[in-house]
Amino acid sequence: MIIYILSRNKNLYSTSRILEAGIERGHSMRVIDYMRCYMNITSQNPTVYYGGESLGNVDALVPRIGASNTFYGTAVVRQFETMKSYVVNSSVSIANSRDKLRSSQILAEAGINMPITGFASHTKDIEGVIESVGSTPLIMKLLQGTQGQGIVLAETRKAAESVMSAFRQLDADIMVQEYIKESAGTDIRAFVVGDKVVASMKRNAPEGEFRSNVHRGSTVQNITLTNEETMIAVNAAKTLGLAIAGVDLMRSNRGPLILEVNSSPGLQGIETCSKIDVAKAIILFIEKNKRNNDV
């Protein structure tokens, strides 16, 4: 098969691992910098160009779209969809996963358990927003934040009011979420491929930090998920239309709760921790589903 990986940098760990796994399976692999692509949008002969070359005749596409390039990256993915290429994660599913509010609404509508969540923009009823998620302590998130950025823990009502007032002055949309005390400083990343969790790890925040992102110095450990955790992770990815996803969840007194679903999950941390060849699992999934699509 001819497989394109849409990625800004072929030397990134995740990109290079998928490239390597595909080559080992005998496929013709190529990394395409999607930001350098341009498109001919017509109904008769839709085309994607890269360095003057027409990119047609591709069997499968693996999007690795960076958060800051979501708009143009999903447009390129959509163009390949128009050309009837098999795309692992669709443009719509990527866009939905990047929008914290929209993805939360979609998951809630599907009955996926999450922390109690509120959303606000220019409201002056700050107390009402706080009460909507059960008072303090609570988590406040800027909708555009990634990798733990733009997330604040407000431990008191006064702190919450101050942060929300500051966000209002920045003209920022914010998400307010209940604080799960029993899971403070820890969460779980489940790597979903198709209808399976192929690897998982637990992330533990450093002392004094509530965000358990690896980029912020968290430690990781291999973990075996319960059946309930596996089911909710797979269902969350499926609900958003993602065949490959990094699903973040936490354990609470009322069961596992979904925090976020990532459409371009990193491989380095989870492969290193779990010792599982996640890249190979992705390629095997593509092989199986491309055959099914061709039938």
Image (cartoon, rainbow, N blue to C red):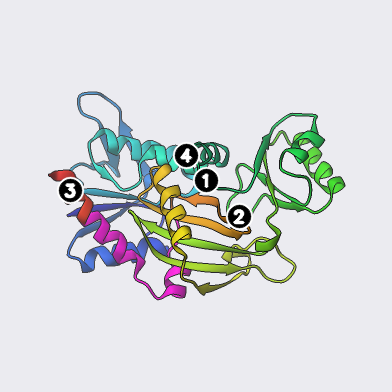
Is 267 in the magenta?
yes
Q: Earlier in the sequence, mark 2 or mark 3?
A: 2
Q: Earlier in the sequence, mark 4 or mark 1?
A: 1
In this view, the residue farthest toward the left is 295
The reply to whether residue 166 is visible in this rendering is yes
Between circles 1 and 3, the one closer to the viewer is 3
Q: Amino acid at mark 3?
A: Asn
Stretch of the chain drawn in magenta: 265-287
The answer to whether the residues at label 2 and label 3 have Cβ atoms under 8 Å apart is: no
Residue 90 as seen in the image, left or right of residue 291: right
Q: CA distance from mark 2 to mark 3?
A: 38 Å
Q: CA distance from mark 3 to mark 4?
A: 27 Å
Q: Amino acid at mark 2?
A: Arg
Q: CA distance from mark 4 to mark 1?
A: 28 Å
Q: CA distance from mark 2 to mark 1?
A: 35 Å
Q: CA distance from mark 1 to mark 3?
A: 33 Å
Write down the residue under mark 3: 292
Between circles 2 and 1, the one closer to the viewer is 2
Local crowd size for mark 2, using a 10 Å CA cut-off: few (<14), some (14–19), many (≥20): few
Write down the residue under mark 4: 110
Residue 181 as seen in the image, left or right of residue 24: right
Percent of width and height locating residue 174: 68, 39
Q: Amino acid at mark 1?
A: Ser
Main secondary-structure element of the magenta-colored stretch: helix
| Label 3 SS | helix
Local crowd size for mark 1, using a 10 Å CA cut-off: few (<14), some (14–19), many (≥20): few
Between circles 3 and 4, the one closer to the viewer is 4
